[in-house]
Amino acid sequence: MRQTKDPAPILDLTFPHEWQATVLQRRPLIAPTQLTSMPHYVYPQAVEEVERGALEIIIHPASDHPESEEFLATFALGFADPAVPTGVWACPNPRWLCAVAGGYAYLVNTANPRQWEQIEYRPVLALTPLLSQRLLLFTGHHSLMAYGPDGKAWETGRLSWEGITILDVREGSLTGIGWDLMADNEFEFEVNLKNGEHERLG
């Protein structure tokens, strides 16, 4: 039986950013001097066997920062499933980076790698950069969450019992489709991109 390869990690640089990132296909069994000499951060540190299937990235912060130093970042894998995203996204804040490993999403301040957080959705099913609104949108099974330049901007209430499809994004709103478990049918909704408030349409 032919084995299908996992899709290549996504690299989305929609937002302006002050860092560079190199995704390692795998860490060498014997690490080169470059890797052994640079700082290494693991996200999250509490996970056992974090390196199994982890996403590993060499991150080069902005050179003008007084503590600028490239570092190796290891992000624990969420799900070994090609249906959930893996990759690197630029954030509305140009110093921050979003790394996603099998649907587990991590936000890291590249100028201070000890400052980070993990997105609550496990897994994140999709990421949508909204450049004009300066929001990075995370899609979960039941709701949406948005991060802006200063961190978490808003989160919707339940939009669906299982799965969300984004249909259209306009200047101030987003429309999508959710699933109503009780009625056993799909419905359309609209989300206000300023505050995450939503309403069911029709």
Image (cartoon, rainbow, N blue to C red):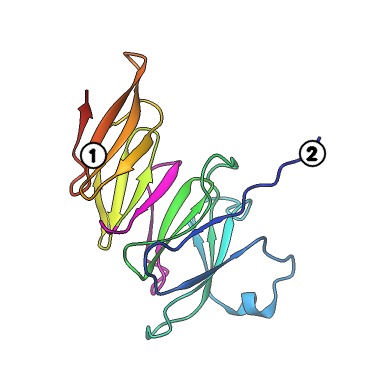
Give the answer, above or below, for where 21 lies relative to 147.
Answer: below
| Amino acid, disc 2 | Arg
Residues in magenta, as a range: 108-134
Taking the spot 62% from the left edge, 49% from the top edge, the residue there is: 7
In percent of width and height, residue 9 lies at: 57, 55
**Residue 95 in view:** yes
In percent of width and height, residue 71 lies at: 52, 73
Instruction: Tell which residue pokes out farthest to the right in this image.
Output: 1
Q: Is residue 185 magenta?
A: no
Taking the spot 36% from the left edge, 38% from the top edge, the residue there is: 166
The Cα atoms of the two marked residues, 2 and 1, are separated by 43 Å
| Amino acid, disc 1 | Val
In percent of width and height, residue 92 lies at: 32, 62
**Residue 124 in view:** no
From the viewer's perspective, tell me whether residue 31 is left or right of residue 145.
right
Q: Earlier in the sequence, mark 2 or mark 1?
A: 2
Give the answer, above or below, for where 101 lies relative to 163.
Answer: below
Taking the spot 32% from the left edge, 13% from the top edge, the residue there is: 183
Quadrant in which the N terminus appears = top right
User: Dot 1 lies on which element?
Assistant: strand
Tag 2–tag 1 contact (CB < 8 Å): no
Give the answer, above or below, for where 196 lies relative to 93.
Answer: above
In percent of width and height, residue 132 lies at: 27, 58
Instruction: Tell which residue pokes out farthest to the top in this image.
Output: 183
Quadrant in which the C terminus appears = top left
Disc number placed over residue 191 in the picture, else none: 1
* Residue tagged 2: 2
